[in-house]
Image (cartoon, rainbow, N blue to C red):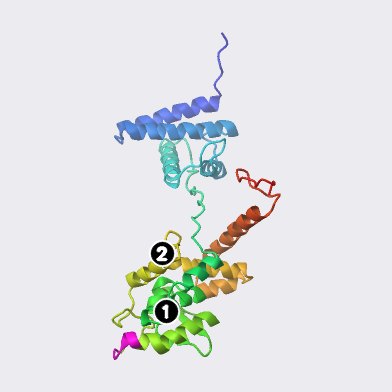
Amino acid sequence: MATVEVPASAARLNELILDFLAYLELERGLSRNTLEAYRSDLLQYGAFLGRAGVDPLAVTPIDLQGFASELARGADGRTAAAPATLQRKIACLRSFYRHLRREQLLEHDPTAELRPPRSPGKLPKVLSRDEVALLLEQPSGETPAALRDRALLETMYACGLRASEAIQLALAQLDLEAGIVRAHGKGSKERIVPIGSKALSALNSYLERGRPALVGLRDESRVFVNQRGGPLSRQGLYKIVQRHARSAGLENRMSPHTLRHSFATHLLAGGCDLRSLQEMLGHADIGTTQIYTHLSTERLRDVYFDAHPRAQMKGRPEGPDGG
């Protein structure tokens, strides 16, 4: 019976793994479960090196990054590794190669600059234009609270305000004649944001008829106040948004920040350039603003595949006429 010849590099890696695990057990006193996890991770790494034809003592940072990328995307039919799993496997490789350096089998640590690939961030939830319109219709009537809620929601969507910016907005930050809001963002940085006609109208009605009734004789500088005339709290803002979202059937789709995300996504879809959007959102880094380009792309894809008769995605049911 013919024997199967094991490649020298694979046999060498097995020896190195056994030596490393012995060190972890005898000198570091690691548990059996931890040792088994390290063994499994290193065998998976060895299989990658075997497919790439790379000797374990001759790997480069590029080889290691290739292994990490393969784990992150789930190559060869395997599911992509979760971020915590990816971190553990990379920690295992770092520990393995530090051991090889201690044993003077390597001059340099190839894992020194190894970083886990950035997993795509979860895209924030946004509302469609129709859903925003439905939400903004919910505060009905002419009571002081209804006038406040209508102005609050309109202003947050019109200016892309964060929840903290909305509750801290002061009367001195409004220039209704010029149609602008001077928002104070993170780090107390001021930015100027235009305010549209619908929000302007809602704000004027609130400031003329709603706010005076709520504030009474109090000396209050904040624009949005609670039922007692004091500053609106973050919790109070959340309850207002949730109450009207529930009335619109959107309670599972949004939070106060959803209006800001919707503001940004709708502006980009309407042709706003990324730099202008960055200024209006108050982002220090344009990379933060670029998440909204992904949102716009996702929305365009959904619209396209739902509408185009010959672009049905795999798994999407076709209509009886093939549409």
Where on the picture, by quarter, is residue 290?
bottom right
Front label number (1 vs 2): 1
Which one is earlier in the sequence, the residue at label 1 or at label 2? Answer: 1
Q: Looking at the image, which is closer to me, 71 or 42? A: 71
The amino acid type, in three-letter code, at marker 2 is Arg
Q: Is residue 55 something one can see in this rendering? A: no
Q: Looking at the image, which is closer to me, 20 or 65? A: 65
Q: CA distance from mark 1 to mark 2?
A: 17 Å
The reply to whether the magenta stretch includes residue 216 is: yes
Residue 222 percent coordinates (x, y): 36, 83
Instruction: Look at mark 1 in the image and give the residue it sits on.
Output: 141
When the figure is inspected, residue 43 is found, relative to residue 233, above or below; the finding is above
Q: Looking at the image, which is closer to me, 50 or 193? A: 193
Residue 246 is tagged as: 2
The amino acid type, in three-letter code, at marker 1 is Gly
For label 2, the SS is helix
Residue 75 percent coordinates (x, y): 56, 38
